[in-house]
Amino acid sequence: MKKFDIIIIGGGHAGIEAAWISDQMGLKVALVSMTGVPLASTPCNPAVGGVGKGQVVREVDALGGLMGKIADLSAIQYRTLNESKGHAVRSTRVQVDKEKYSENAEKIIASSNVEVIREKVSKVYKKESMFHVELGKKGLKASKVIVTTGTFLNGVVHTGEEQSSGGRIGQMASDGLQDLFLSIKTAPTRFKTGTPPRLDRETIDFSKLEPQESDPKTQNFHVLDNLYHRELEQVPCYLTRTNNETLSIIRDNKERSPIFNGQIKGVGPRYCPSIEDKAFRYPERNSHHVFIEPEGLNIPTIYPNGISTSLPKDAQEDFIQTINGLEKAKILVYGYAVEYDVVDTINLSKTLEYKDIPGLYFAGQVNGTSGYEEAAGQGIIAGINASLAFLNRGPLVLERTNSYIGVMVEDLVSNRRDEPYRLFTARAENRLFIREDNTTNRIHQYRKLLGLNSELDQFQTQYMAEYIQLDKYCEKFIFKSNDETKGYFKKMEYGPLDDNVTLSQLLKRSKLDPVATLKNEVEGFLFPVVQAVAISKKYEGYINRANLENQKLVKLGKKKIDWEKIVNSASISNECKQRIKDIRPETFSQAQRIKGIRPATLAFIAGGI
């Protein structure tokens, strides 16, 4: 058997992040992916980012990951979501060319020392301290294995009554992990995801649709790129809507829907429902947005985002052609649902290592999450921690107080998932601080712990030095209340100047754009630094107030606890003991988030730490 330090099973978004970061850390890495499945493929909507998700992409980028870089190389449209709202909830979303995205992922992985093996896994088992991975006649072994099989674990594809084995249309399921999974607890409920039909671009009447152009002011994801450089031609997406006729057809076909006739047992994502779910969840609503999004510059298919379905093919054709602009639309690939097994994540630690099998890690949709971005965030965490463990170094755990990846991981390991997990800004208690603009401020401390000295590390060092310098300057620089400065304030439309004010105080004025104002007042600093300082000053009072309120809770939340000692106490109810025993929390914060835990139990735990 050929020996590696780490073997990654699955070449999706989680898999390539785990492989790339492990290679950066000097390990010998094998990435095993099925034949015919492109690396980092986008089988659902070819888009990266979104509310909460854009923040994750930037965090992955700041840790040294790939998703932001590949997205920029493949982007055909940029947009800033929630632009009319506060900076805390603004998020970048990029439509990508699906073929270019996988091509760029393949090129970048090929430039590394990662050995990509295109084989189907036939068997995985652990013997003594080594994992053995059999691939037909070949064999691999390693002391660390990361499983990133996505929706392929016992996956079944549904279109109406038609069923086939696979993790997506036309591709096989992962059944070579059965030996390994005899020891792995899967969630008691299978999960489901779905996708809409793909439409022939040439059969759509775009003149009836509402165009949504690419935004040239939206910044690239990768911090080492030119902020606004576009590698590919930028194209519009379009908006249309369903109507009464559309929803009537869907409701009339309820008994033929795999979701409602009992054919599909799995639970789908609440926050990204199929059009059938919408039809019956919101019976009073018949108008739902349908975003008409190209899958690439030279790809004939269009992705109608918002009408995911597993209805029979004839029903899909009927309801599609009721939608404005799609009256003559031809379906090239029918919509389908995928039902699959997921790991019971309460058995994972915050490093994403399986608690009862040292050296085995899980990341991505196999952990019950729902998006490419969540998968990438888990992949880089699993890759970093598997590498650190191999090097006999301590683990790296991102805190939920300063990262969305930290929020996601703690949410996953603190409770048994009963539906696919989707990350969004409301899940973060500290979202005024966890913003896109200050990602480097939040994440550089974690990247620094890896001990690397790449171009990214040099950028982050320069960034932090400039940030500290500019932050101090804003506090010290004073606009004196004299005739000359009052005239300047009037010219710049800064508002009245009745008393002396610091630059920091000026940035807090409600009618001013803090970024534009600070940019006018300083020169020579990196623009991302100017942006982060300006927005941080704007929110400073709110952030400080929240910090004061949460400081004691945060400090308490980080405290380590001994769950075995707790469950042996006579002071805890049997119900709470069982919940704690199931989750095996490592910190008080994790214990707090266990579903059904009683306040008296938390008070008892807090009293002992």
Image (cartoon, grey):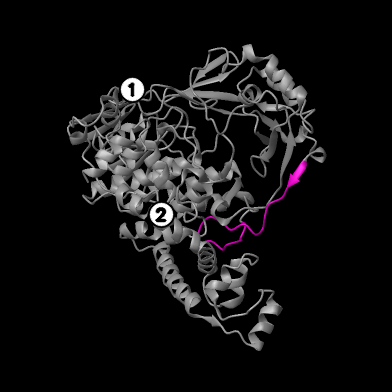
Q: Which residue is mark 2?
A: 549
Task: Name the residue furthest right.
Answer: 207
Q: Please state the extent of the stretch shown in magenta in the rendering.
A: 210-230
Asked whether residue 215 is drawn in magenta, I would say yes
Q: Which residue is mark 1?
A: 178
Asked whether residue 452 is drawn in magenta, I would say no
Query: At x 18% / y 30%, what residue is drawn?
Result: 570
Return the residue nearer the eye: 147 or 548.
548
300 vs 52: above or below: above
Does label 2 or label 1 sit earlier along the sequence? 1
Query: At x 40% / y 35%, what residue is drawn?
Result: 148
Return the residue nearer the eye: 282 or 132.
282
* Mark 2 Cα-neighbour bin, 10 Å: few <14, some 14–19, many ≥20: few
Horizontally, residue 516 falls left or right of residue 125, namely right
**Please, what is the three-letter code of the amino acid marked with disc 2?**
Glu
Secondary structure under tag 1 reads helix
Location of residue 77 in the rendering, given as x and y in whole percent from the top left corner? 65, 49
The quarter in which the N terminus is drawn is top left
Is residue 429 in view from this perspective?
A: yes
Return the residue nearer the eye: 397 or 219.
397
Is residue 147 in view from this perspective?
A: no
**Please, what is the three-letter code of the amino acid marked with disc 1?**
Gln
Location of residue 97 in the rendering, given as x and y in whole percent from the top left corner? 61, 44
